[in-house]
Image (cartoon, rainbow, N blue to C red):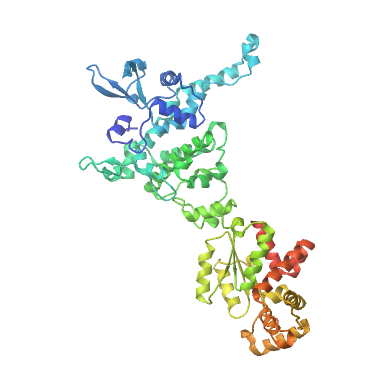
Amino acid sequence: MGYGFRRAHEADAFDQFPLITPSKLHSEARDRGIRCSLSTFVEELERLDREGAFRPVLFEAVDAGGADTIVFRDEQGYVPWSEYAVPEWGRDAPHPYYSPWQLLYFNDAVELPNVSVQIEWLLDDERRATLGPNWRTILSRQLERWRRLDREWRDVLLVLIRLQGWYGPSVKGTLLKSTVTLVPHPESGEYVDPRDLGPPFDPHKVLEELGLTQEALKAMHQRLAVHGMMMDGGDDPLRYWHILFRMAPAKLRAKLRGRARRAQDAYDAAEMLRRFYFELTGELLPNPDEIFDISDKSWRKRLFGRWPTFRYTRADLAVELRRRDLHPHQVHIVVEGDTEEIVCRRVLKELGGMPLNDMGVSVERLFGVGNVRRERLRALKAFPRFLVFVADREGDMAREVEALKREGVLTDEATYLWDTSFEAANFTDEELVAMIVAISADRGATLTLDAATLRTLYDARRSKAGRDAKGLATFALDLAQRAEYGSVNASKTELADRMAALILDDLRQHDAEEVSARRPIASMLISVFRVT
């Protein structure tokens, strides 16, 4: 690779991810669950440098003439760090600097020279002396891997350093926004995006500058993705929540600790390479959680609407929350009349024992007809996890509903169309009259209307009015107001409360399936309760 730390430094490649000191490296390492002692940390870093496991990017030093200078570690073999020491707080100390990307392999640098053994074996001289040749071979290879660890990561490190100025803001940002570290303009002094100061980013020239092939870049991406998913011989503890955490802002991901945080480092690195590869080829490499997904990925396209995707969006977040059963808006019930709205609200509140908003359920009466209604339902489709529609089949409603089903706005299992009316489909004539009788009794009045008379008069009215006929409940309440039937002035709200109470009483006294068979609205409300 023709690219090195000197070129990176001269091109201000560290603007987005500045080099860090040993104290900062120690702090970041601890956040990632890497075991290291603060008191001997610098001495341990020198040992890792000497052995080839973990080398600094550069040292701040002084030359033979006493002037400040920079020593790039990839241009200089190991020398004792005392030779780089500069005056600091009354003593001489070395000033090494590291790239934050080196945290990708720092845990291996710390852990590979160690092996866990039982205390009894360690303290028993005879047993310890019997370490077999196979174990000696395995441990020797582990030690050799440790000593070449920095070399094995060097190419990946240099690629990340070269790309971080261009793609770094995207991995440091939020779901849809980049976060750029601004720098002062050399002439005006105003703080600007450093990407505006340099020449245009040409991915093909950058690939040539790095001395890489597209296949090598693709292999690096897979290496980083797998490293995040399966580091240290174990899985990323958040691998099954991968999409959700990748949608979180980088500042929140930085609050993760231990292996989960190290995994996010690897995913950030893989994302930069993925974007670089896309600009080179127009091909989207798989996300880390797709590496071990042996399916044809069709389920992703079915859920998200498109796949693969360059980046996640707010729409993707809603899909993922629904997939994890975390979407705050579980069910939205759209009804056509006041009675249905009152019944749905009261029954669900009683079943859930909490306000509907706490359950993630909302109920809305849909006013308007024709195109206005259709557009409203299309807009609502993106809001809840389930959209439930309740209406009468009369007029053009059945045709409109079938069109919305074909569009995917409504589904068969979440659509309830009453052949006549909500009241007639869920309550008998005797029950409707009994509820109005109870309302009249509360007011000291007497209803003389009976179920048979109600049905006879209603059927006669429907045969004349046809599609314009009132619903059964409205017709019954109008009859009750007549003097010949008792002059009972009951409202639809009062009647709806009685209906809700009757459904709740049935559910307390009978099996839910039995109630559902008699009252379809109860079946729907029980289903809503179950999914919430």
Judge from the rendering whether residue 282 lies leftward or rightward of residue 108; answer left or right: left
Residue 399 percent across, percent down from the top left: 58, 76
Residue drawn 40% across and 42% down?
214
Task: Name the one closer to the observer, 472 or 167.
Answer: 472
Find residue 208 and report its image quarter.
top left
The foreground one among 181 and 304 is 181
Let me know if residue 145 appears in the view: no
Indicate the position of residue 447 as horizontal and vertical percent values. 75, 81
Q: Quadrant of the N terminus?
A: top left
Residue at position x 45%, y 18% from top? 40
Q: Is residue 218 above or below residue 334?
A: above
Report whether 437 appears left or right of 372. Answer: right
70 over 372 or under it: above or below: above
Query: Residue pushed farthest top?
Result: 125
Name of the residue lying farthest toward the left: 187
Q: How many marks?
A: 0
Q: Could you say which is closer to the camera, residue 365 or residue 13?
A: 365
Which residue is more in the foreground, 63 or 299? Answer: 63
Residue 164 in the image, given as x and y percentages of width and height: 37, 39
Q: Position of residue 151 (x, y in %)?
A: 42, 27
User: In which quarter of the view is residue 434 placed?
Assistant: bottom right
